[in-house]
Amino acid sequence: MPQFDARYFSSLGVWTVLSFFAMLLIVWKVLLPSLTRVLEERRNRVVSDLESARKNREEAAKLLEEQKELLSRARTQADEILHQAEEMSRVLREEKQKETLLEVESRLRKAEAQIKAESDRIRNELKKETVSLVVRGIETVLEESLSETQKMVFINRAIRAIESGAVKGEPKKAG
């Protein structure tokens, strides 16, 4: 093998050193600047991405605080609306109760007036019927017709007796 032959050692060593320095020069002039440029671009991109992430994180934190503030205001507003609705409901309920009470009282007064009117009507009918029966009874007992004056006397007595409650065993009223 020629590489192990001592005659070729010197020229082989020179060519190896020359090849090494040529490769070193090519790497240093061609590859190193490209690698340096790529690494610098990558470093810049990483720094840029980190800066962008920091800004995004700060913006996200700011937006989160704004959302919390909006949510807090919305809850406060909802509580106010709920309180107003409850108050309005209470007021409407009270108004409705008052209206109902007034209507009940009005109907009660109307019913009492109707009962009193009906009672008075029945009382008057009873008086007329009683008077008519008294006159007929007296005419039957006497077996003759009474004059108008006599009828009026008996009618007035019967009315006073009815009003005082002294009709056939009914005790007189104290007042």
Image (cartoon, helix red, strand yellow):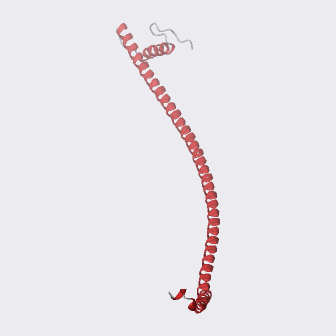
From the viewer's perspective, is residue 35 above or below residue 141?
Answer: below
| Nearer to the camera, 83 or 67 | 67
**Residue 118 on image: x %, y %:** 44, 26
Number of marks drawn: 0
Residue 74 quadrant: bottom right
Is 107 positioned to the left or the right of 84 in the image? left
Residue 140 quadrant: top left
Is 24 positioned to the left or the right of 158 in the image? right
What residue is at 48 percent from the left and 26 percent from the top?
116
| Nearer to the camera, 61 or 40 | 40
Q: Residue furthest front?
A: 6
**Residue 23 on image: x %, y %:** 58, 88
Quadrant containing the C terminus is: top right
From the viewer's perspective, is residue 161 above or below residue 74?
Answer: above
**Residue 122 on image: x %, y %:** 43, 22
From the viewer's perspective, is residue 165 above or below residue 7?
Answer: above
| Nearer to the camera, 16 or 42 | 16
| Nearer to the camera, 41 or 119 | 41
What residue is at 58 percent from the left and 42 percent from the top?
90
**Residue 24 on image: x %, y %:** 61, 87
